[in-house]
């Protein structure tokens, strides 16, 4: 595995593969890699001859009071894991390379509609930061296909809209959420959970599964199910931001008889903010 930090090295590798008409799969990450990330890398390996992974903790997607400075940075361990997965190239740019005029002065991309509501209400500017950094990485890596996890469901919708609206010839591959044995979605932020909180955390997934099961019965209005789940999570010890049932494609609210929808939630538990979703 090659590790590159500068554009000339990256462009030389990308140009060589593209000139040979070989497919490139890309997995953008912020590092602190766990089994969920490696699952994305394995899927990328199935989709192309070459796999590029980036590690970049992006400052523009962190809001005031969020954990940019304390976000875990484990580059050496991450590189070892990626080498073991036969990744072709690890791209680890600096903030100065990604934002040559400074993060505050960077051109930003705003994605209307799908970035509004849900986490967009609780993390203002977050999805503009995500869209901005992904657009820059796509322009640098020039992949044929990019792989993302479905745990960050709204983020995936934002990226799909970004690619579609800008007519980029990039396939976006969504990969189902990888979970711990007790159902908790794998996340770098799970490390913030205390032992007691970690035992409670799987209740989030269990609650979403219950809501999904009730939606399949078409007996209760989505608003009622959302309210009941919100209250149940509160009583269990979480501080919910939202529980919401949305159309799986548009992320717009649905009616009782919806058949293609997703149940999404974000909660706070101690120092951790957990997000999860279940398709119906």
Image (cartoon, rainbow, N blue to C red):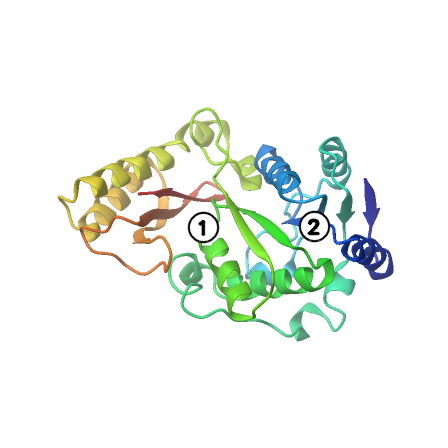
**Left/right of residue 192 with respect to residue 214 in the rendered view:** right
Question: Farthest residue toward the top?
Answer: 181
How many discs mark residues in the rendered view? Answer: 2
Residue nearest the observer in this picture, 185 or 227: 185
Q: Which residue matches tag 1? A: 153
At a point 30% along the width and 42% down the height, the residue shown is 234
Residue found at the far front of this picture: 21
Q: Which residue is mark 2?
A: 23
Q: Residues within 10 Å of mark 1 (few under 14, many from 20)?
A: many
Q: Which mark is residue 177?
A: none
Q: Quadrant of the N terminus?
A: top right
Picture quarter containing residue 209? top left
**Taking 235 as reference, is 79 left or right?**
right
Closer mark to the observer between disc 1 and disc 2: 2
Q: Residue at x 52, y 61 (%)?
A: 126
CB atoms at circles 1 and 2 under 8 Å apart? no
Horizontal side of 26 relative to 90 (left or right) equals left
SS of the residue under disc 2: loop
Image-quadrant location for residue 87 = top right
Q: Position of residue 30 (x, y in %)?
A: 65, 48
- Across and down, in percent, residue 99 comes to 72, 67
228 or 197, nearer to the observer: 228
* Residue at 48% over, 32% down: 179
Horizontal and vertical percent position of residue 188: 58, 40
In this rendered view, identify the residue nearer to me: 34 or 70.
34
Question: In front: 261, or 119?
Answer: 261
Image spot of residue 157 (x, y percent): 46, 57
């Amino acid at each position: 595995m090659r590790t590159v930090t500068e554009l000339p090295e990256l462009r030389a590798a990308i140009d060589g593969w593209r000139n040979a008409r070989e497919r490139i799969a890309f997995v953008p990450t912020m590092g602190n890699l766990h089994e969920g990330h490696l699952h994305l890398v394995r899927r990328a390996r199935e989709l192309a001859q070459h796999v590029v992974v980036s590690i970049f903790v992006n400052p523009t997607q962190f809001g005031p009071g969020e954990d940019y400075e304390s976000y875990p940075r484990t580059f050496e361990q991450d590189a070892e894991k990626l080498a073991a997965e036969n990744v072709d190239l690890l791209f680890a740019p600096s903030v100065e390379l990604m934002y040559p005029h400074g993060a505050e002065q960077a051109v930003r991309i705003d994605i209307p509609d799908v970035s509004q509501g849900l986490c967009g209400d609780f993390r203002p500017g977050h999805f503009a930061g995500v869209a901005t950094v992904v657009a820059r990485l796509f322009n640098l890596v020039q992949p044929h296909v990019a792989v993302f996890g479905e745990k960050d469901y709204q983020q995936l919708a934002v990226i799909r809209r970004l690619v579609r609206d800008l007519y980029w010839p990039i396939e976006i591959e969504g990969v189902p959420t990888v979970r711990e044995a007790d159902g908790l979605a794998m996340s770098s932020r799970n490390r913030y959970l205390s032992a007691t909180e970690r035992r409670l955390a799987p209740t989030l997934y269990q609650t979403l599964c219950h809501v999904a099961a009730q939606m399949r019965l078409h007996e209760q209005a989505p608003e009622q199910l959302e309210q009941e789940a919100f209250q149940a999570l509160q009583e269990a010890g979480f501080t919910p931001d939202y529980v919401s049932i949305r159309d799986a494609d548009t992320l717009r609210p649905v009616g009782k008889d919806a058949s293609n929808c997703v149940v999404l939630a974000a909660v706070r538990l101690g120092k951790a903010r957990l997000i999860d979703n279940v398709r119906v």
